[in-house]
Image (cartoon, grey):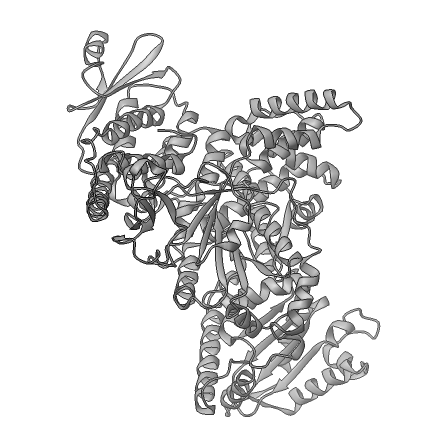
Amino acid sequence: MDIEVHCVDATVVLAKQIKTRGPERTWGRGELLQIVKRWIKLPLAKGASFEIVTAGRLGPSAEALRDALSEAAEGEWAQIAKLVGISASDPIYPVLARVAIRQELYGVEPILAEAERQVRSMLPGSRCDTDLSDLAGQTIDRLFRVLSTKASYSAPEERFVGRDEIADILGGLDRIHVEDRWPGTLQNEYLHLARDLPDGSVTAPRLLPTRAQHATLPWNDQTLGLEQLRSCQGPVILTGRPGSGKSTAAAVLQKSAAVEGSVVLVAHAEAYLGNRLDALVADALSAILRRDIPSATGKQLLHDANVVLFIDGVSEVPHTIRNDLREELRGHVARGNGARIILAGRDIAAVTSVLPVNALPTRFTIAPIGHSERFQLAQRLVPQGQSDGDRDTSARTLIGMVERSLGDAAENPMLFVMGAQLINDGIPFEDRPSMYAAAIERMAERGLTSDMASTVAVLGVVFSRLLDEGRRYAAPLEWSRLVSEACTLVADAGIDVSPLTVREAADRCGLLTTIGYTQLRAPLHDSFADYLAGWASAKMLTSIPDLIADDDYQRVIFAAEIGGVDTQLATAVTRSLPFCAARIAQYDRRPVDHSSPGQATEHLKMLLPEERVFGINMWNDGIRTIAYLTDGPSGWVEHHVGQQMLHEAPSVVCTSDEGPLAVAVRLWRVLLKEALRQSPGPALPRLDSIESACAALQNYAVAESEALSTLIDQVAPARTRDPLMKAIGPFGLEAIVRPRPNEGFLDEWPIEFAQASHISVRANEGSLSAELEAYRESSVESVMRKSPQESASDRINDAINTLVGNKWL
């Protein structure tokens, strides 16, 4: 077995060769010397130590070699020079001084026993010594199996055993030093440092509650401050588009809480190891304290009800990692007596999936910045020294220029600030991709970095590889390997650049950063990884997978914006991310030809429930392309046939340069609006008693839940229903009907209610379940102002707009 130990910059610091040999065979000097000579010729030998470990017998000549190497380590060169055959001035001497031969006569069993003894001191305490001994034995067996199995692989990357994997096997520390115990003095140390953390905010993000069913809270059309996240009982979910301010919200919350003497600990899901939530918490604490904190301390924080644990980037890690995190959070949330949990990420469905189904978290999204916030930001960003009137004029001009280039994306604070700063610097851009390209070029100039074009190509390939695995980060050693492999790949495309040049350029310009105390390598912001990977795909250096993960839609959008939509991308998106198809359809500029009706039909079939059978007919009036659904085969029709069918079947009018996906998405929108169109219900009868009000609301909730299930079956294929249902939220209702007040509410019955997985309506009895989402106040009559079918339609409509964006429906 060969073992190499690498430091974080991928340099080999120690190598071992483990050699077994039966008792009937003896090692001679020639065999061992051959191994030593092969080692000293390797480039990595100049900076590493090397040891040959064997359980076999050493003959007299082999013992002489062993002793000569030991003398060389002490500075005595004569014997080793004679045996190896080198001169006294040869520069290889320092290398030989780090070579050793070690004989282990007792075989593998004593080694395993000693390993068990050492691991016992590292494992968490068990109920008794027998348990601890068994656990240590199991741990060493597992470690030995992993090492033995990986040693048999042929590919170098498959033989690598990372620090995280070893840590996962060995577990946490049993003992905690006094200075590492929580709360104790450690909490004071944390608070002192957290108060001085930068929060990176140009403007503090604001929150919008996720719109729940029926009526709205009085504050539902207003934005809320971040302190609302800390006041919620039970778990909280915070979502928002890339750059909307989720990480900024975490930083602001952490700092403001520390100023008040409270603890909001921000952890990054990227640093999570499966089934080691305590290690994640310890890593987050270590990142603030800048020293190693044991996992056992992390476990103490998890049991502290005064701590809020904010886990950022939940939807940006692989599905398997989210599954492991869900298993750990299941018990933690069920107990309800430890640290409160806030989960943040881009995708509401992915983040929600991490919590148990019955958790019913309070859900918020980051509010887009309105015109007044953009005006305040622009005033800070325009050149100083102007009069108030001139500064206001400059600010409005700056806002207009950013909005013309970015459109609705200007509501994103990160993109708005990035665009405004580029304009102030005199750097033009036309759209979102060109803004990212200009921002990277600007960072390169400020970092005095050359050959950024080659670096962008390599990083695009690297982040494509990572996104294929559902992540945007890598351990330092893995990062070095990925960069080297990407350099080899882009060389085939005529891009000649060295891995060292790429690593230095990315670090110097600030495009890369580190996550947590483990120093994982990651982009300055997740959206840069998406842009770079999308760029690489558009330039044909990489390809989008046929099955796209739920949280990979931004790479897809960048690829479409930069390189347009081809058949492979359109097919992959309609199959995997149907709601993303509505986002990229505008970039489908494939020429309309004889195959277009058939292609549009295939795309639309992927977007609709499986049982629908139809074709698409198309015709052109010389300026526009018109398409409509038909029960017959797909194809082109004559002008007069198309005109006749225009008002008899679902149809759309497209510009002449819109491709098959654009046609399919336009028809999909027409069909969705038709399916969600519901007739008004009968007028609500007068409710004369609290009992009749409860019965009416109970029946209404049941009818709405049934209508939701029916409508979802009508509008979504089975494979896409999960994200839609998660965006809608629980179908049930828990409500308490209160007595009529003497005044106000116009004789309506007041209620407190919340979304729930069940349906329960009570008359003036107690309070809502503590684990439910923040309750809402309204009246029975207001909640039932629309029919159950209309209310269900509105909720599905809102959910689809949330998934697509820009009020698509």
Front residue of 334/618: it is 334
Front residue of 607/380: it is 380
Q: Position of residue 489 (x, y in %)?
A: 54, 45
Quarter of the rendering containing residue 30: bottom right
Front residue of 722/596: it is 722
Q: Is residue 589 above or below residue 418?
A: above
Question: Can residue 599 be seen in the rendering of this structure?
Answer: no
Q: Position of residue 796 (x, y in %)?
A: 31, 37
Residue for point 56% across, 92% down: 105
**Given the current orientation, which residue lies at the most extreme right position?**
89
Q: Position of residue 266 (x, y in %)?
A: 57, 57
Residue for point 39% across, 28% down: 585
Question: Can residue 707 be seen in the rendering of this structure?
Answer: yes
Front residue of 662/452: it is 662
Quarter of the rendering containing residue 261: bottom right
- Quadrant occupied by the C terminus: top left
**Given the current orientation, which residue lies at the most extreme left position?**
631
In the picture, measured across the screen, residue 91 lies left or right of residue 161, that is right
In the picture, measured across the screen, residue 422 lies left or right of residue 676, that is right
